[in-house]
Image: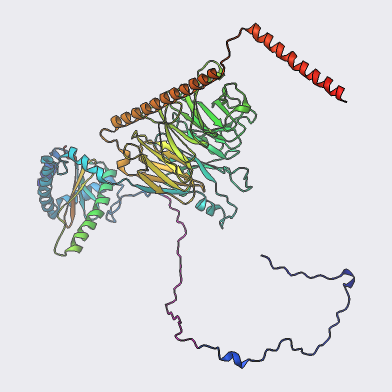
């Protein structure tokens, strides 16, 4: 229930295009997009987050990745990583 | 110098047995030592002697075989699901998902991540962190960067292509010049290149006749191979229909291709009615059907064709500047120019260095030639109108490039200095009105900015060691491709300073061209005045010599008759005197 509320709140913000929750194996648990796009995002962003996290930890082993933001021409992809799950939000920044 | 050993023997002596004989040793020279010379022996002191010790070095070169890369796609299928769940089954996946959602860890994590995410989302909505402040001021700083150009791609045809067909490099593969380049009208990712050998009468047996269309993404293998019956000298994409190309052949025929139909020409013009020399210029015309083109060649003719019926040309013009239409007097055409905004006028550059401006719609053939501009010492290799000022055009030939104005027929209004090597091709920039490019036969590409500096090119790049034969600018003005004598096509990207319009450039360029045109007009007027004065002065001198009174024609006749008879009489008397003396 809380989960629902949180995800709904995020989705309701201005400019948010999609929300995806992925588990550690790359399986999408919750998504607001169609299956094929979700699978693509899940697979690719999972790998990227792993790489980013290992980069941060390589430079300083005490450090850890808290948030990842990818800004592209069309929209911004935000990834909040955790040990087990990944929360991905795609937003159109207003300009 | 050759060292020859000559052995001679009398024919009658052949076959005789050899008779060898022994001879005792003979002393030929005997030089006894002379002790008196020993006293003049000087011991050398000090003695210079060199000693050197370095480690032995040897030179090695390593190069890998050219790797051919091909792009392929991979299809990803869903994975990661635990073994017992089949991803295709919707029920199983839903059940799995519901199970995960009930997990407590999941709930906590999501709530925590949710707050984090919301913070960022709100941040994004509040302010654009990448906003450009003071955008206008930034433009001023861009000018500091010196002009430069960077090679993007080099298409060296045949080196790897033939490696695929033959196991070793065939030494007979002749290098052909890339004589003409044409960009694809829409995408600008494809380049059609015509290859032929322009050396006079050098037809190697193994020379292939093919010309290629290259896709820039793949410089190893041409996208399409065009196979004409004779090598192509010029090749152009149809600006209206990007699948159709027309090509002018070395033997004077015209052929056209449809890229959807493959590499063989769809139709070829009949040999009897085509040109008799290589077709150096072929351009598409602006017409409703989009199928008309015209061609020019060094045999002195300009022919108009309709693609649908290449069996005979629709119209013909003989480039005879005495306006009589005689083929013997005609000048050979080396380049052709046509501006779609002025559909009835076109210009031809000739081998003799003269540019002829013609009007297609004139009523009689002699009137078709409107004016001629002469100024080059050698063939005019390139001719281009300025895309911003149609009255200004540029010609490239012999060792200079000249800019002309249509109104001034006596000479060019501006010209570059005389270079050390021939200029082979040139074209205007499509974005900046005072910038143009030229290629030289020592392999250099020059970029001239006439508003900035007129003595030297703004940028001079050595592209390759062999002469550059053709040049073409892409429509966006940033990428230029040049073809060399050995068939290599190089693509260069020029720095943004040379391909973006500066603030006052159009105004300054207009002012400069007008100023030069006016200067030439004034010079022309002065020349004419001086010539008139000269003529008047000469006539004045003649009238001074003739101080005899003005005679009527009858008097002149009488005087002439009298003088004539006087001469006859004198002659008769002389003969009579000679007879009496004998």
Residue B16 lies in quadrant: bottom right
In the image, residue B432 sits, relative to residue A55, either above or below, namely above
Relative to residue A41, is residue A93 drawn left or right?
left
Relative to residue B358, is residue B389 drawn left or right?
left
Residue B505 appears in the rendering? yes
Q: How is the image coloured?
A: rainbow
Q: B299 or B193: which is nearer to us?
A: B299
For the point 58% across and 10% down, which residue is it?
B550
Is the C terminus of chain B in the top left, top right, bottom left or bottom right quadrant? top right
Residue ranking furthest to the bottom = B35
Q: B75 or B286: which is nearer to us?
A: B286
For the point 30% across and 38% down, which residue is it?
B500
Residue A93 lies in quadrant: top left
Q: Position of residue B515 (x, y in %)?
A: 34, 29
Q: Is residue B51 magenta?
A: yes
State the extent of the magenta-drawn residues as a range: B43-70
Q: Position of residue B319 (x, y in %)?
A: 56, 26
Relative to residue A33, is residue B40 drawn left or right?
right
Relative to residue A93, is residue B437 drawn left or right?
right
Q: B325 or B191: which is nearer to us?
A: B325
For the point 75% across and 13% down, which residue is it?
B565
Q: Is residue B440 magenta?
A: no
Is the N terminus of chain B in the top left, top right, bottom left or bottom right quadrant? bottom right
Q: Position of residue A75 (x, y in %)?
A: 21, 41
Q: Position of residue B148 (x, y in %)?
A: 33, 47
Residue ranking furthest to the right = B12
In the image, residue B369 sits, relative to residue A77, either above or below, namely above
SS majority, magenta? loop
In the image, residue A23 sits, relative to residue B520, either above or below, namely below
Q: B296 or B581: which is nearer to us?
A: B581
């Amino acid at each position: 229930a809380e989960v629902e509320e949180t995800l709904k709140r995020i989705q309701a913000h201005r400019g948010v295009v999609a929300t995806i929750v992925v588990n550690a194996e790359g399986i999408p648990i919750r998504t607001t997009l169609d299956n094929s796009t979700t699978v693509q995002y899940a697979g690719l962003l999972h790998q990227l987050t792993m790489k980013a996290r290992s980069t941060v930890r390589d430079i300083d082993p005490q450090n850890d990745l808290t948030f990842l933001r990818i800004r592209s021409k069309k929209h911004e992809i935000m990834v909040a990583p955790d040990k087990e799950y990944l929360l991905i939000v795609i937003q159109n920044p207003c300009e | 110098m050759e060292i020859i050993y000559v052995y001679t023997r009398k024919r009658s002596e052949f076959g005789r047995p050899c008779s060898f004989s022994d001879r005792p040793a003979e002393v030929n020279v005997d030089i006894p030592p002379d002790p008196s010379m020993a006293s003049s022996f000087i011991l050398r002191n000090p003695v210079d002697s060199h000693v050197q010790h370095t480690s032995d070095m040897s030179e090695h070169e390593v190069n890998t075989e050219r790797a051919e890369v091909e792009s392929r796609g991979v299809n990803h299928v869903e994975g990661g699901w635990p073994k017992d769940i089949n991803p295709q089954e919707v029920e199983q996946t839903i059940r799995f998902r519901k199970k995960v959602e009930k997990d407590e860890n999941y709930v906590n994590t999501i709530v925590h991540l949710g707050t984090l995410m919301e913070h960022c989302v709100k941040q994004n909505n509040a302010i654009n962190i990448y906003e450009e402040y003071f955008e206008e001021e930034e433009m001023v700083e861009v000018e500091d960067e010196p002009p430069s150009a960077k090679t993007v791609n080099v298409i060296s045809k045949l080196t790897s292509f033939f490696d695929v067909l033959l196991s070793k490099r065939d030494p007979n593969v002749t290098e052909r010049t890339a004589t003409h380049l044409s960009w694809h009208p829409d995408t600008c990712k494809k380049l059609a290149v015509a290859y032929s050998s322009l050396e006079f009468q050098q037809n190697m047996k193994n020379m292939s006749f093919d010309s290629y269309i290259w896709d820039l993404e793949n410089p190893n293998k041409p996208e399409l191979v065009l196979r004409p019956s004779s090598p192509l000298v010029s090749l152009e994409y149809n600006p209206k229909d990007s699948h159709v190309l027309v090509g002018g052949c070395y033997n004077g025929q015209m052929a056209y291709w449809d890229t959807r139909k493959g590499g063989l020409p769809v139709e070829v013009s009949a040999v009897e009615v085509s040109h008799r020399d290589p077709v150096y210029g072929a351009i598409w015309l602006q017409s409703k059907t989009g199928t008309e083109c015209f061609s020019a060649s060094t045999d002195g003719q300009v022919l108009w064709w309709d693609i649908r019926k290449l069996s005979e040309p629709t119209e013909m013009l003989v480039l005879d500047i005495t306006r009589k239409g005689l083929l013997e007097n005609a000048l050979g055409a080396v380049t052709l120019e046509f501006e779609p905004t002025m559909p009835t006028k076109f210009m031809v550059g000739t081998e003799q260095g003269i540019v002829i401006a013609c009007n297609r719609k004139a009523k009689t053939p002699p009137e078709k030639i409107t004016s001629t501009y002469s100024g080059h010492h050698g063939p005019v290799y390139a001719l281009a109108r300025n895309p911003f000022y149609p009255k200004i055009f540029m010609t490239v030939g012999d060792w200079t490039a000249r800019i002309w104005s249509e109104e001034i027929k006596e000479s060019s209004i501006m010209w570059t200095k005389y270079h050390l090597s021939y200029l082979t091709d040139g074209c205007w920039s499509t974005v900046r009105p005072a910038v143009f490019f030229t290629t030289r036969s020592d392999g250099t590409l020059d970029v001239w900015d006439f508003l900035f500096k007129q003595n030297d090119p703004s940028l001079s790049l050595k592209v390759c060691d062999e002469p550059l034969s053709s040049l073409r600018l892409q429509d966006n003005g940033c990428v230029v491709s040049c073809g060399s004598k050995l068939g290599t096509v190089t693509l260069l990207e020029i720095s943004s300073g040379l391909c973006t319009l500066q603030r006052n450039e159009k105004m300054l360029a207009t002012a400069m061209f007008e100023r030069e045109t006016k200067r030439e007009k004034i010079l022309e007027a002065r020349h004419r005045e001086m010539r008139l004065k000269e003529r008047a002065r000469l006539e004045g001198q003649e009238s001074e010599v003739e101080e005899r009174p003005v005679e009527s024609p009858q008097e002149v006749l009488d005087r002439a008759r009298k003088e004539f008879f006087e001469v006859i009489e004198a002659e008769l008397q002389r003969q009579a005197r000679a007879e009496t003396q004998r």
